[in-house]
Structures are given as structure tokens and as C-alpha cells.
């Protein structure tokens, strides 16, 4: 996590800073994982170390000098050549280290003091950042809880509505069955009241 942002000769210093922060944070219930993140329960804050660079004129390597000479020779002899891609400047690590705590705070070496003199401030920033992460997580969880409650409430309302519709349909069916049975009984009574009824009519 440091190899792309810190010079090799500066890393031992960064390790000492990390070590001091770990020892100061542990009594507060905060630990560091393998990804340079301070953790308190499920809430984590990332530390990002970087080292500033100074821009200096690029000093040609032996191969680059040869490629440049070849290009110049091609220009003289043929009037054209493949120009080598040689950068003009190098960016050299200069020992000025900075550390980002989460997304909001950054501390760096300055004329007024180096990082080692600001470990207390960095530790407070870590604690505040973890607390911010915790608050944000709890807000997300509360929002999700309310969303699930509202979803369940809607499901319950839909279920009650479906049950009511089913009861209403059943009642309507029963009313229709009763009305049909009443009509059939009335028809039978009329038929049976006739003086002469054939055997087939009686069976019917």
C-alpha cells in the first residue's frame, strides 16, 4: 500500500508513525487492519500516505543518449527518423510526507512541524472520522429499517385488501346461490300445484 506513493528510504519513517498511531488508538478500542484502515467494530477509516515529489530536469540514460544520437543521424542522412520518446522532467521523492484520514482530513509535513509532532491531531481526526462513519452507517441502517417497515406495511395492507375482496366475492356467490335456489323452489312449488302432473314431470 505504500510502494507506489512513498520512497523506499522514507518507508521506515512512515512505519514508525503508523506504529505510534496503532499504540495510541488501541486503548480507545480502535485497531488497524492489513489495508491501513483503522477499525472500530464494523466502522473503518482508511489512511492514505503519500510523499511529495520535486520536478527536476531528466538526465538522459545511456540508452536514451544512443537513441537520440541515432535519431539525429537519421535526420542528417535521410531527412527523417523515428523520434525517441524521452521525458523532459523527472519527479523525485523529496521526503515531505502527508497522510489522509478518511475523505475529509489531510496532514502534511510543513515548516511549522512534521507529522510526528501532530500525532495527537491525527489520532483525534481518526476518532472523529470513525464516529462520522458510524453515524452515516446508523443513518443508512435506520433508513433501510424504515424502508423495510413501509414495505411490510404495504404487503400487510395488500394482504388485508385481498382477503376482504375474497370474502366479498364469496358473499356475493352465496347471495347468487341463495337467489337461484329460491327461484328454483318457487318454480317447483308452481309445478307441484298443478292438478295433473305426468310421471316424467314428477321425476324432473
Image (cartoon, rainbow, N blue to C red):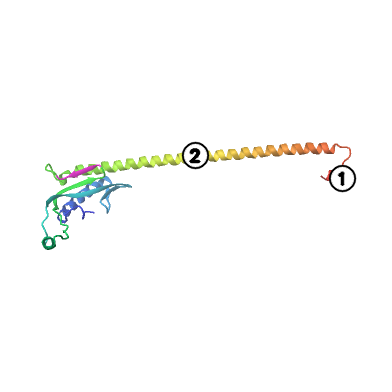
- Residue where numbered disc 2 is placed: 154
Image: magenta residue range: 104-109
Q: Residue 148: where, in percent of width, then height?
A: 44, 42
Front position in the image: 96 or 119: 96
Single out the residue that lies furthest toward the right: 196
Q: Is residue 40 left or right of residue 94?
A: right
Instruction: Kindly identify the residue that appears in the image at 20 percent across and 47 percent down.
Output: 99
Badge 2 marks a residue whose secondary structure is helix
Of the image marks 2 and 1, the number of the one nearer the N terminus: 2
Residue 63 makes an appearance in the image: no
| Quadrant of the image containing the N terminus | bottom left
Give the alpha-carbon distance from disc 2 to disc 1, as whole Å.
Answer: 62 Å
Instruction: Kindly identify the residue that appears in the image at 70 percent across and 39 percent down.
Output: 177
- Residue where numbered disc 1 is placed: 199
Q: Is residue 105 magenta?
A: yes
Q: Residue 92: where, in percent of width, then height?
A: 14, 53
Q: Is residue 177 above or below residue 60?
A: above
Q: Quadrant of residue 183?
A: top right
Give the class, few, some or many, for how many residues have Cα within 10 Å of label 1's Cα (few <14, many ≥20): few
Q: Residue 101: where, in percent of width, then height?
A: 24, 45
Q: Is residue 69 magenta?
A: no
Amino acid at each position: 500500500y505504500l510502494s507506489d506513493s512513498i520512497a523506499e528510504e522514507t518507508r521506515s519513517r512512515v512505519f514508525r508513525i503508523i506504529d505510534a498511531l496503532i499504540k495510541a488508538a488501541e486503548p480507545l478500542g480502535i485497531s488497524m487492519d492489513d489495508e491501513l484502515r483503522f477499525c472500530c467494530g464494523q466502522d473503518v477509516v482508511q489512511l492514505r500516505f503519500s510523499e511529495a515529489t520535486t520536478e527536476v530536469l531528466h538526465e538522459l540514460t545511456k540508452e536514451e543518449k544512443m537513441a537520440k544520437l541515432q535519431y539525429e543521424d537519421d535526420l542528417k542522412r535521410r531527412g527523417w527518423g523515428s523520434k525517441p520518446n524521452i521525458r523532459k522532467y523527472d519527479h523525485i521523492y523529496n521526503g515531505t510526507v502527508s497522510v489522509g484520514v478518511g475523505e475529509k482530513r489531510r496532514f502534511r509535513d510543513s515548516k511549522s512541524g512534521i507529522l510526528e509532532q501532530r500525532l495527537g491531531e491525527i489520532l483525534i481526526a481518526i476518532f472523529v472520522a470513525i464516529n462520522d462513519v458510524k453515524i452515516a452507517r446508523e443513518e443508512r441502517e435506520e433508513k433501510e429499517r424504515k424502508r423495510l417497515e413501509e414495505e411490510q406495511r404495504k404487503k400487510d395492507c395488500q394482504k388485508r385488501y385481498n382477503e376482504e375482496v375474497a370474502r366479498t366475492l364469496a358473499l356475493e356467490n352465496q347471495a347468487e346461490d341463495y337467489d337461484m335456489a329460491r327461484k328454483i323452489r318457487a318454480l317447483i312449488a308452481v309445478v307441484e300445484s298443478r292438478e295433473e302432473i305426468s310421471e316424467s314431470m314428477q321425476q324432473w
